[in-house]
Image (cartoon, rainbow, N blue to C red):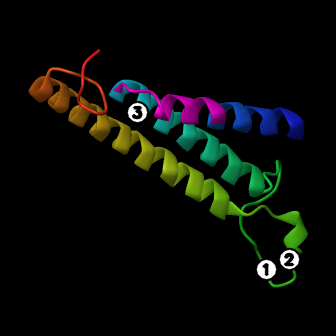
Amino acid sequence: MELTLAIAIGVLSASGVYLILRPRTFQVIIGLSLVSYAVNLFILAMGRLRTDAAPFLSGADANIADYTDPVPQALVLTAIVIGFAMTALFLVVLLAARGLSGSDHVDGRGD
């Protein structure tokens, strides 16, 4: 399972970096989204996701090893919401820039 997750994070990161280096703005936006997803998976994997464990401590005699850390899950949830908002903003800016310049190239030059 760890190998599968590591490969998925690597593929998402590599694909995202490849698309960020492309000349068209839509490909750059998709690349930023893929890198964002890879970072979210990495944070979630580093947070030691556990099943059937409570996310908070209850009582003074509770053992910390029996509980899961809710902070990585909260960080990933917040990052998903912010990433969705930023993608929507980037798409609006993309449409406005294409309408003004007539091209969707990052450097402003056409084919």
- Quarter of the image for residue 85 reads top left
Picture residue at 22% right of the left edge, 36% below the top: 93
Nearer to me, 46 or 30: 30
- The residue lying toward the viewer, choosing from 93 and 25, is 25
Left or right placement of residue 100 versus residue 49 in this view: left
- Identified by mark 3, the residue type is Ile
- Kindly identify the amino acid type of the residue bearing the numbered disc 2: Ala
Q: CA distance from mark 1 to mark 3?
A: 47 Å
Residue 29 is marked as 3
Measured in 3D between alpha carbons, the distance from the residue under mark 3 to the one under mark 2, in whole angstroms, is 45 Å
Q: Residue at x 72, y 36 (%)?
A: 10
- Horizontal placement of 65 versus 6: left or right? right
Bounds of the magenta segment:
14-24
Q: Earlier in the sequence, mark 1 or mark 3?
A: 3
Residue 109 at x, y percent in the picture: 24, 25
The amino acid marked with disc number 1 is Gly
Q: Position of residue 92 (x, y in %)?
A: 23, 33
Label ID, residue 59: 1
Circles 3 and 2: CB atoms closer than 8 Å: no
Query: Percent from the top left, x then y, of residue 32?
Result: 47, 38
Reply above or below: 87 against 82: above
